[in-house]
Image (cartoon, rainbow, N blue to C red):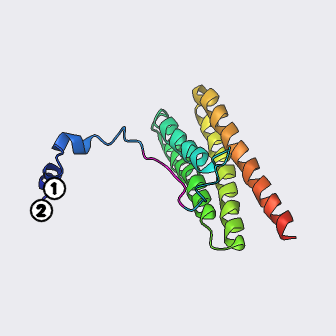
Amino acid sequence: METRDFEQSRGESESDALKMSNFQFPMSNQCQNPNVKSEYDLVERTSRFGEEIIDFIKTIPNNPVNQTLIIQLVRSATSVGANYMEADCAESKKDFRHKIGISKKEAKESAHWIRMIARANPDKAPDCRKHWKEAHELTLIFSAILNSKKNQDD
């Protein structure tokens, strides 16, 4: 069955199937106890950080210097949330600490790349400042989680 036939069998036109750019993915943490709601949803916050970086880099001019910086920033910024989600479903305390540690490193690395983008694109400094602040706050949050877990294990 061709893709077009499949879309039509589901009642979708070809144009409906292509309109995915504004699709909102509902993010829920399936590993977390559904009866426990966190006041600060790090899954959402880390996902939003990656999304905002993706949107931000689209505004940066395409040149050889920026290309390298953009690739590095997208990798590190999106990795923060991916590793946090893995930590949230960790199989052991050691695995949890390891994944939180990676999230912390990726957030710290993101702050570095944001700083480099601000240097290469002075007109983007106000946006960079906002994103750097979020990367720094995430780094501090992950540090606090690691310190808390370390104290619990001692």
Dot 2 or dot 1, earlier in sequence: 2
Distance in Å between CA atoms under marks 2 and 1: 7 Å
Q: Residue at x 55, y 47 (%)?
A: 47
Residue 39 rendering spot, x and y as whole percentages = 68, 44
Whether residue 88 is situated above or below residue 53 in the rendered picture: below
Q: Residues within 10 Å of mark 1 (few under 14, many from 20)?
A: few
Residue shown at 19%/40% (left/top)?
15
Q: x%, y% of residue 12?
A: 18, 45
Q: Are marks 2 and 1 in contact (CB under 8 Å)?
A: yes
Callout 2, which amino acid?
A: Met
Q: Which quadrant is the N terminus positioned in?
A: bottom left
Q: Residues within 10 Å of mark 2 (few under 14, many from 20)?
A: few
The quadrant holding residue 129 is: top right
**Nearest the camera: 105 or 34?**
34
Horizontal side of residue 46 vs 101, given as left or right:
left
Q: Which mark is residue 6?
A: 1
**Can you say whether 16 is above or below 154 in the image?**
above
The image quadrant where one finds the C terminus is: bottom right
Q: Which residues are magenta?
A: 25-30
User: Label for residue 72?
Assistant: none
* Tally of numbered tags: 2
SS label for mark 2: loop
To which residue does mark 2 refer?
A: 1
Examine the structure image and report whether residue 9 is included in the region drawn in magenta.
Answer: no
